[in-house]
Structures are given as structure tokens and as C-alpha cells.
Image (spheres, helix red, strand yellow):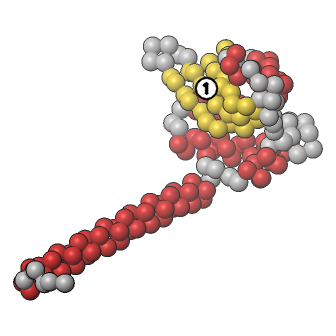
Amino acid sequence: MANLLTSETKQNLQSDLLGRKLVGASLALGLLLIITLIILGSFWVSLFIRESGLVSPPSTTNKELKGPPGSSNSASWLKKIEDEVKIINNYWSEPLISILVVKTMALKPASLKILGFVVERGEASQTTKLSLVGLADSRNGLVNYVNLLRQDKFFSRVDLPVESLISDRGGQFVINLEK
């Protein structure tokens, strides 16, 4: 085969190729560094949340909160609720919000899992709205929980949208509460 390129052109092409390889390798290394920082950051946040007491492992929470007042483990149940109130008060300045959250968790049966809360405080009115989002094992357990909230008379309004009752097996639900 004939050699059509000059040695100077060949050298320029080889140095361009080497430069491209170095840029590609440095981009790959930078991407690897960014991914590592994201993973380590998420682990750090998870560790911080776990050590601050905001989230406890599910196995201990479910065992300690199973019994209602008057059962054999009511002392540990009340202690757990008091600890949760203290933790929540550290992050929310208004005690009413803490009471709302703890009240809903105290009445929650083991068949329900609360995934999150949304709190709205009216500026002009003195009402506080709390929306619970969660998962239910069965529709009956969800309806029983809503009835417990209504019987408690702590909340002025308890709404369970019809969409939450569609499936017999339960599923995702939203409960709107007002105090």
C-alpha cells in the first residue's frame, strides 16, 4: 500500500488521537467521581437520619406500637409515643402539628403503613389540615382506622376519598384531616 501521508501529518493525527483518548478517560474518571460522591452523600444522609432518630427500623417500630393503651405493653407504647413527640418538636415549632402527627400514629393499626404527611396551616383561619398518604393491607383495615379517627373527636373533619376504597385488597390511600 502506498504511503500517501507525510510523517508530519501522521504525527499530528497520532497526537490528536492521544488527546481524544485522554479527554475520554478524564471524562469517564470525572463521571465515576461524581457517581461516587452521590452514592456516598446518600449514605451519609441516610446515616444522619437514622442516628438522629427521625426514622427507626421497621421491625422495632411495628413491635413497639402494636398495643393500644390498656394492653400488656402500654408502658412501652406510651414511652415510644412520648419519644416521637420530642423528636417531632425538635423539627416543628408548633406543638399542634406534633400532636396531630402523633395522634394519627397512635391510632394507626399495624395493617396500615403511613408513607408521608402533608400539613397546611391556614393564614386567616385557625384550622390546620393534615393529609396522610399510605398503604393499606385491606379496605376493612383502612375503614376501621378512619372510624377510629372520627370517633376520637380530636379532628373536626376526617375525609377518606372514594378512590381509596376502590380495591378490596387495600392499596394506596389518602386521608384528609382537619383540626
Quadrant location of residue 25? bottom left
133 with respect to 165 (left or right): left
The residue pinned by badge 1 equals: 131
* 12 w.r.t. 99: above or below: below
Quadrant location of residue 36? bottom left
Residue 137 on image: x %, y %: 80, 34
Q: Residues within 10 Å of mark 1 (few under 14, many from 20)?
A: some
34 with respect to 144 (left or right): left
Q: Amino acid at mark 1?
A: Ser
* 108 w.r.t. 152: above or below: below
Residue 108 on image: x %, y %: 77, 33
Q: For the N terminus, which image quadrant?
A: bottom left
Q: Residue at x 40, y 68 (%)?
A: 32
Q: Residue at x 93, y 44 (%)?
A: 72
Residue 109 makes an appearance in the image: yes
Quadrant location of residue 129? top right
Q: Residue at x 68, y 27 (%)?
A: 173
Q: Residue furthest bottom?
A: 7
Residue 155 makes an appearance in the image: no
Residue 10 on image: x %, y %: 13, 82
Q: For the C terminus, which image quadrant?
A: top right
Residue 18 on image: x %, y %: 22, 78
